[in-house]
Image (cartoon, helix red, strand yellow):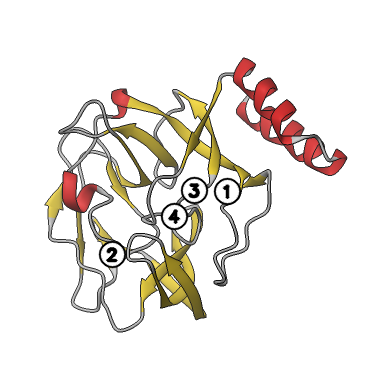
Amino acid sequence: MFNLIKALLKIALGLGVVLLIVAAALRVLFVDVAMVGHEGMAPTLVAGEYVAIWRKATANVGDVLICEHPGEPNRHVMGRVLSKSGYKVRTDRFGQVVVGDETIQRDFRGERRFFDTTRNEMVTMKYGIAKFGYYENEFFIEKGRKPTLRPTYVKRGVFLLGDNYTSVGNDSRYFGEVDPETCVGQVFMILWPAEDRGDDIRHLPLSLI
């Protein structure tokens, strides 16, 4: 069903369907709409973008989820599932993320200018593609910094990690693992991108992630 919806959305994009009409139709098809509230998922998603969420999707490694904050039930958090229960996650001495005995491979592709709205400044980010198991995703690491993830055993929930590895305060490194039963669903599309901020981020409306 989910793959069918994604295929239909690609067709709709090719036909140039108006955003508001698409959003209204999506809500009928078990989809919610939310706005990204922080820069922890850059470059995949940035603050101010409107995204589509597949309600109550199964939490799989590599998915981007919106869930209840484990310590603040009235607040929501967003991140990519790094690990499910039963694994230890950490960074090694080179700053590479390790899940169990497997290291996430990083393919650096150069540098990007990124306007961080949290800090209200333009920063230089090292950009690349992370590869882990069957999935790949874009990532950022601020130039001159190294990601840190203290050894953590995921006991019962899922561990969320942002694609902006050097962002502070926005993933399970700071608020701990998340109960997947509290998750709203899986983010799968950018409905409408953020305003142009003068950096190298260029997202298009109705882009699948």
Nearer the observer: mark 2 or 1; the answer is 1
Image position, residue 56 (x, y; %) = 44, 23
Nearer the observer: mark 1 or 3; the answer is 3
What residue lies at 67% left-to-right and 35% top-to-bottom? 6
For the residues labelled 2 and 1, say whether their Cβ atoms are less than 8 Å apart. Answer: no
Mark 4 → mark 1, Cα distance in angstroms: 17 Å
The mark nearer the N terminus, 4 or 1, is: 4
- The residue that label 4 is drawn on is 133
Q: Quadrant of residue 126?
A: bottom left
Mark 1 → mark 3, Cα distance in angstroms: 16 Å
Mark 2 → mark 4, Cα distance in angstroms: 13 Å
Mark 2 → mark 1, Cα distance in angstroms: 21 Å
Q: Give left or right: position of 122 versus 22.
A: left
- The residue that label 1 is drawn on is 209
What residue lies at 17% left-to-right and 51% top-to-bottom? 174
Image position, residue 3 (x, y; %) = 65, 32
Nearer the observer: mark 2 or 3; the answer is 3
Q: Quadrant of residue 31?
A: top right
The mark nearer the N terminus, 3 or 4, is: 3
Rendered position, 180 above or below 152: above
The mark nearer the N terminus, 2 or 1, is: 2
Q: Disc 4 marks which amino acid?
A: Gly
- The kind of secondary structure element at disc 3 is loop
Q: Quadrant of residue 89?
A: bottom left
Q: Give left or right: position of 142 versus 190.
A: left
